[in-house]
Amino acid sequence: MTVTRLCSGLALLLLFIFAVPRLWAQGPPFQTDDPVPVDLHHYEFYIFGGVDGTPVELDPTGPAFEFNWGAVPRLQLHAILPLGGVLPSNNPVYLPGGTGPSNFGLTDMELGAKWGFILQTSHRPQIGTFPMLELPTGNSTKGLGVGRVWYKLPLWVEKDMGKWTACGGAGYQLVKQTQYRSFPYGGFLLKKELSERLELAGEVFSHGREGFAAAQTQSSTMIDLGGYYHFKREGMQLLFAYGHSIAGQTENYGYLGMYWTWGKDGKKAAAGGIGPPSRLGGIAF
């Protein structure tokens, strides 16, 4: 936990020291999200795949489709339609978790609204929230969904500093279902713009115990590394990330996707959107 505290403290310090005139949002391909909504009358579209798993269970995602819309000033509407799988280990060591057949199909659909209620200035960070609800569109009897509506309630903070960006925050996942648990989560991320085409970042992300019906039966803290490659075509990017746990339950996380953005005024919108794939904590949906 010493590494986690050090990275968290550094990110918090940077949030309040530096300033820059432009904003770059986070979100995919990382698990730490951001408080920066899509610009008014702008749109974002992602096609992505990913994986998140523990020795208990592996949960691949993809193909999945995400759409974000800058509906009104400072407010973004968000939706994800995901396909995915569940591959239990069926190892008796992890009973009662990780048992059953492998399945693939539609998982729980995500809807949300990102509200940036405090704008960034030279003296303060951007602050916002991104509440989401997960609709029970996946077949819960096959392990492809929870079987009930569940919620994410986070608060995110971001500050830019030249070629660097720091963001972080925390939230609570509310899941009222048998063998699932409600739990806290949070993360801190640092990103650097290395060139006009390439940005790289690293994050520390933690979540609590999620219940025996999830792969993440215990809490875990991860370090994830990844970035963004900007193609010559304006508004088009490749997003990538991979991470592994450093404390708690062993966990792996991966994300690979394509991103497009466009808008009425022709300006290039900031990269980012929701976070990494929509997740039930560590489960990629």
Image (spheres, rainbow, N blue to C red):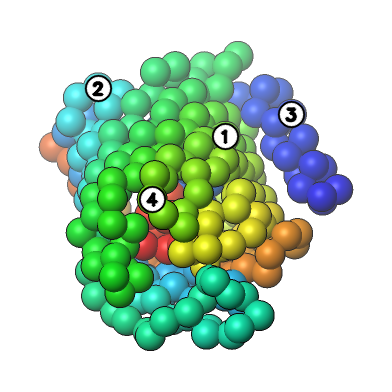
Residues at discs 2 and 3 in contact (Cβ within 8 Å): no
Of the two numbered discs 3 and 1 in the rendering, the one whose residue sits closer to the viewer: 1
Q: Nearer the viewer, residue 262 or 32?
A: 32
Would you name the residue on which mark 3 appears?
13
Q: Nearer the viewer, residue 113 or 48?
A: 113
Residue type marked 3: Leu
Sequence-wise, which precedes: disc 2 or disc 1?
2
Of the two numbered discs 2 and 1 in the rendering, the one whose residue sits closer to the viewer: 1
Sequence-wise, which precedes: disc 3 or disc 1?
3
Element at badge 1? strand
Of the two numbered discs 1 and 4 in the rendering, the one whose residue sits closer to the viewer: 4
Above or below, 158 against 241 in this view is above
Sequence-wise, which precedes: disc 1 or disc 4?
1
State the image coordinates of residue 80 (x, y, percent, origin top left). Answer: 25, 54
Q: Residues within 10 Å of mark 4 (few under 14, many from 20)?
A: some
Residues at discs 2 and 1 in contact (Cβ within 8 Å): no
State the image coordinates of residue 35 (x, y, percent, origin top left). Answer: 44, 32
Q: Rounded to the nearest whole Å, what is the CA distance between mark 3 and mark 1? A: 13 Å
Q: Rounded to the nearest whole Å, what is the CA distance between mark 4 and mark 3? A: 38 Å
State the image coordinates of residue 195 (x, y, percent, origin top left). Answer: 55, 55
Residue 6 in sight in this render: yes
Would you name the residue on which mark 4 appears?
177
The residue sitting at 75% across, 59% down in the picture is 247
Residues at discs 2 and 4 in contact (Cβ within 8 Å): no
Taking the view exactly as shown, the residue that stands out farthest to the right is: 2
Would you name the residue on which mark 1 appears?
169
Taking the view exactly as shown, the residue that stands out farthest to the top is: 123
Sequence-wise, which precedes: disc 2 or disc 4?
2
Would you name the residue on which mark 2 appears?
73
Q: Locate residue 59 relative to residue 84 in the image: left or right.
A: right
Above or below, 56 against 221 in this view is below
